[in-house]
Amino acid sequence: MREYGIVLELSDNNAIIGIERNSACSKCGACEPDSGHFQMKVSLKNTMNAKPGDIVELQLSSIKFLKASVILYLIPLLALIFGVALGYGVGIYLEINREFCGIICGILLTFLAYLLIKMKEPKFKKDIDLTPQIIGVYSDEKGECLYGK
C-alpha cells in the first residue's frame, strides 16, 4: 500500500509527515488524526534525509496490512458464525427457541472475540509492525525523485 505525504517538520531523527486521509487507512490506528479530519500526522524515521516541504512516498507492506485485516475482521466474523451455529445446537438440545439462542450466542462470541483482540492489541502491534517506511523523497517544485526508488 503506497501513500504520499508532505514533510511538515523534523524532530530528532524523525520526520513528521502529513498524509491525506483515505478510506483504506482512515481507521487502521497507525496514525493519529490531526485536528482537521482530512489529514493524519505520522512520525517516521527519516532514513532518506527528507526536509520540511518535501513530498515523500510511503509504503506499508501488503502482507502486514492483510494480517491486521484478518485479525480485525475475519476472526470476529468466524466467531459470529460459530456462535450462531453453537447457539442453534444448544437451542435444539435444551428445547428452547433455536433462533434466539443462536443470535445471543453469536453476539456473545463476537463480543468476546473483539475483547480478546483488544486485550492482545499490544502483542499484535509488536508482532505486526504497521509503521510505513519512507521509500522516496520528491522535490516540491518539479516532482522529481531526489532519493529512493
Image (cartoon, grey):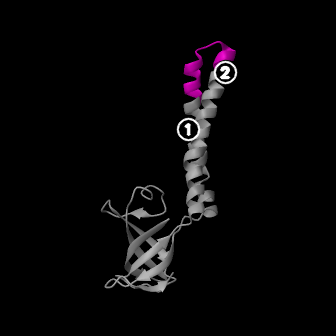
90 in magenta = yes
Q: Does 137 appear above or below 76?
A: below
For the residue carrying disc 2, how many other residues have a C-alpha within 10 Å: few (<14), some (14-19), or many (20+)?
Answer: some
Q: Quadrant of residue 102?
A: top right
> What residue do we see at 66% from left, 27% from top?
86
Amino acid bearing label 2: Val
**CA–CA distance between discs 2 and 1?**
19 Å
Q: Quadrant of residue 128?
A: bottom right
Residue 83: % across, % down = 62, 31
Q: Which residue is mark 1?
A: 111
**Can residue 109 be seen in the rendering of this structure?**
no
> What secondary structure is marked by label 1?
helix
Range of magenta residues: 89-105
Using the image, tell me which numbered label, if any, was put on residue 58.
none
SS state under label 2 = helix
Mark nearest the camera among 2 and 1 is: 2
Taking the spot 67% from the left edge, 22% from the top edge, the residue there is: 89
Which residue type does callout 1 highlight? Phe
Residue 90 disc label: 2
In the image: residue 6, left or right of residue 123:
left
Residue 135 in magenta stretch? no
